Amino acid sequence: MLSAPLGSAKPTGLLQGCSTAPGDPAVLLGVSTAVSVLISSHSPPSIPCYAGSCFLGPFPPLCNPLPPSTLCSLMPTPSSAVSSLQTFTAWCNSHLRKAGTQIENIDEDFRDGLKLMLLLEVISGERLPKPERGKMRVHKINNVNKALDFIASKGVKLVSIGAEEIVDGNAKMTLGMIWTIILRFAIQDISVEETSAKEGLLLWCQRKTAPYKNVNVQNFHISWKDGLAFNALIHRHRPELIEYDKLRKDDPVTNLNNAFEVAEKYLDIPKMLDAEDIVNTARPDEKAIMTYVSSFYHAFSGAQKAETAANRICKVLAVNQENEHLMEDYEKLASDLLEWIRRTIPWLEDRSPQKTIQEMQQKLEDFRDYRRVHKPPKVQEKCQLEINFNTLQTKLRLSNRPAFMPSEGRMVSDINTGWQQVEQAEKGYEEWLLNEIRRLERLDHLAEKFRQKASIHEAWTEGKEAMLKQKDYETATLSDIKALIRKHEAFESDLAAHQDRVEQIAAIAQELNELDYYDSPSVNARCQKICDQWDVLGSLTHSRREALEKTEKQLETIDELHLEYAKRAAPFNNWMESAMEDLQDMFIVHTIEEIEGLIAAHDQFKATLPDADREREAILGIQREAQRIAELHGIKLSANNPYTSVTPQVINSKWERVSAAAGRRGGGLLWGVGDPLPNIGTPPQDHCGALGPEEFKACLISLGYDVENDRQGDAEFNRIMSLVDPNGSGSVTFQAFIDFMSRETTDTDTADQVIASFKVLAGDKNYITAEELRRELPPEQAEYCIARMAPYRGPDATPGALDYKSFSTALYGESDL
């Protein structure tokens, strides 16, 4: 309970007109509130109120004084007081457990002032005066006074709360004091878009839950009753923890418990509220919900600070990495260009004559390619190298980095010296090449004639061996074979026509040998290859003709068998279908004589079955013979007979059905003789200018700016547009864009800021670990830092500690990396 009964106390003054019964805890709370208001009548106009006290302080007010006629509406009901007690206790324990302790009874456990002082030390991060350990009342009062003095030192004026009330276990005063502490240390410093304290916290909740359906946060009481707002806050920051789309507005208890359990398990926010109390209360306790929601704000804002710090580091590292990439690109481009110069100069100075005109022509072509293809890009690379060098030096100067000094021998001046040597070597090279070509043309005419004829012949023979070796006739039909034979006859005519060209090639090769041509060995080898290939083509042509003719005869035999099969299979198939119709036909008889007549007819039908079976076997034998011939000669038959669709499988299937139906028919008839009925049937069967606004926005988004199409993004984009387009012309010039980006990078790029950011990630330690870097930074930036950070050598060093301070100063050239 929050308080003892008031007995016969009656509401007076500000409480007149209130319908609450005397003795109710709410009356007691209201009386204290009213007294406090009267005492503070000359205080500032905004007074945050809670049961038993009013608090004055420099922080923004959470509620305003109300006229007596409406004051009763602020008096908490017994259930809301219990809710506040539960929430405040959980809130205190969420901080006390950091010091290894907790409270069970909020109005008892703070009486000696020890845990109260400990609570203030934990939440403020400051040391209070040393407490008195005595157990006498005076010691307890002194300890509580130290705590109250500390609260007052933070700019909070306590009205009607004295150390004696806390020591005496006055629940109302104790709750009021705790609410003051919550306001000062958990809510006052909240600031969102120029609003603070309660209004700032409410605006934060509205911004975070705006995208979620069925969530409309307007206050800190009924807006939270269905539990969706709590779940939305968690899902907005940690979407993997909440399956928001599965939540139902009509199941508030489940929603609330889900949010409370997730927050306690994954966010280290203890359960401060009771789901049933919230749902069963017309207007949940505002202070309890506000206290609980502030825990979410601080939990997520801490993550936001770490994210901001990580972003700052990423930005600085990105600049450094970009500069390093530019340095690496310069070194590589300079190295490649110098290597090209080193290779090119000896090539241009080489005057060794070649034996063939082709080789000399290739030299001339290579030189022309050098002039037309290879050299121009190198001229461009040389210019680009100088531009990159100057750009890099400018970037380094603007970003407070030391100037770049290329490796030895890779200065721009070194490249210019090498380039002059290339220009000198080019002189006279082309004229020498042309003279050599004219000399060799006289010797190469005959060899060129040989090569032309050989090339024409080789082009004609290309693929001919593969064509003659293919066994396409193995899967061909009879009509296909006849077409292949006609095609082969045409090839034989073409082969005979090329006989003259082969003889001419041999004659030219003989003439080159007689003239002692320097490259006669290669000519002879090529001529011999052509002659050998010609013999092979003749042999393959003969073999293919024999194979085609043999396959034609075999397919003709198979075709005759297929036709014979079709002629006999069709009537046999019709006979089986008719037999099935007769065997399945319903018979209706009235006398034994009629049944006996049917039996006699059926016996006559059965007598024909052996002959029919022999016919079936003969038909199937025809098919097997065709298959045997095909397998014997390696012929791949088509799956279907071209003359009929009745396959052996169809014949066998229908034959089995006829045999089975005959047996059933006979049984049915015999059964009918033994027990004649009026109706007897068969048994059942199985059946480069300026950028427009949208272009400029796309540039900003690509650079990482949050200017997406929502309210906050539009506001940020409008702010940036006012900087780059102050005249409202509707376009952004390139120079305005460059000036804006220069200001943006200059404002945040200092060594001290980077060190401060690393300190946030390291939890205020003087060193950072590889695990913390990998947790807070993207993988590429994390590994970059780990590879370059020196081990930390301070007195508080632990195994694996890294020195982020020396690393940060090295980024700006203030120390060696």
Image: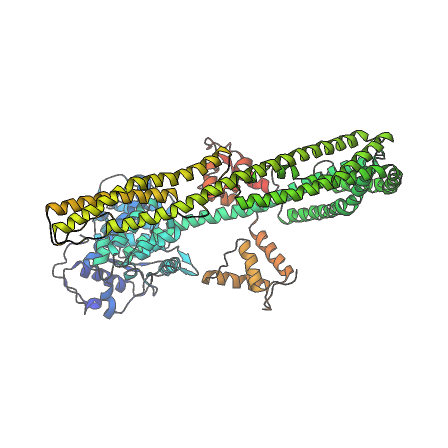
Q: Is residue 774 left or right of residue 74?
A: right
Identified at 23% across, 70% down, the residue is 69
Residue 700 lies, in percent from the top left, at 55, 57
* Residue 374 in view here: yes
Identified at 69% across, 39% down, the residue is 461
Residue 553 lies, in percent from the top left, at 54, 39
Identified at 64% across, 35% down, the residue is 542
Tell how many labels. 0
Residue 508 lies, in percent from the top left, at 82, 35
Q: Nearer the viewer, residue 725 or 235?
A: 235
Q: Nearer the viewer, residue 234 or 77?
A: 234
Q: Which quadrant holds residue 233?
A: bottom left
Q: Against 723, is 341 above or below? A: above
Q: Against 411, is 159 above or below? A: below
Residue 366 lies, in percent from the top left, at 78, 41
- Quarter the C terminus occupies: top right
Q: Is residue 786 left or right of residue 729?
A: left
